[in-house]
Image (cartoon, rainbow, N blue to C red):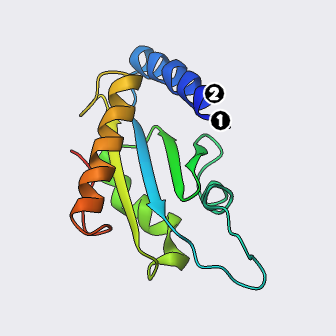
Amino acid sequence: MDAGSFRLVLDLEVRKAQRLRYCLCVVRLKGRLPESREMPCPSMVKIFASRIRATDIATERGADDVALLLVDADITALPSILRRIIADFEDVPWSAGAASYPKSASGADDLLEQAERMLVDAKGNGGSDSGPRR
């Protein structure tokens, strides 16, 4: 899914969440997965997409950058969700930024901007030690 389609789906999902009163999280993950003989150029989005629920969406934002839309996921659950997603790659340097509707963001643009800002902050603070926005 390209960035434009992801943004459209995110906007529609925020509207639905407003009506039905549930939470959404947008997570940005950035890191480089190690190459191997079996996977000479691993795709983060393909690997992470197989580790999220069918209702969630993963999209590539760049070569080593993935955005996730986690439907009906509260921000307090993010640490355990992220541990599951990166379980086999804990020794790989990565950074994450997250935002949550309605706790920290009021709409799709706000979710994307906050997750991006938190990702930049996490990278500046050394990567995976930084937690999600609450």
Q: Is residue 105 visible?
A: yes
Can see residue 131? no
| Badge 2: residue crowd in 10 Å (few <14, some 14–19, many ≥20) | few
Is the residue under label 2 in contact with that under label 1 (CB below 8 Å)?
yes
Please identify the quarter of the rendering in which residue 101 is found.
top left
Q: Residue at image x 58%, y 25%?
A: 9
- Give the mark count: 2
Amino acid type for the residue under numbered disc 1: Asp
Q: Residue at x 54, y 59 (%)?
A: 64
Image quadrant in which the N terminus is located: top right
Determine the residue located farthest toward the right in the rendered image.
Answer: 38
- Nearer to me, 51 or 35: 35
Residue 104, label in figure: none
Q: Residues within 10 Å of mark 1 (few under 14, many from 20)?
A: few
Q: Position of residue 94 (x, y in %)?
A: 41, 67
The residue at the point 44 percent across, 78 percent down is: 90
In percent of width and height, residue 24 lies at: 41, 35
Q: Is residue 16 above or below residue 114?
A: above
Residue type, mark 2 in image: Ser
Q: Which residue is mark 1?
A: 2
Q: Look at the picture and state if 89 lies above or below 97.
A: below
Does 110 appear above or below 26?
above
Residue 4 spot, x, y in % from top left = 60, 26
Q: Which residue is mark 2?
A: 5
x then y, percent, for residue 14: 45, 22
Q: Nearer the viewer, residue 92 or 12?
A: 92
**What SS does tag 1 mark?**
loop
Report the quarter where the C terminus lies: top left
Query: Quadrant of the rendered structure where residue 100 is?
Result: top left
User: Residue at image x 67%, y 62%?
Assistant: 43
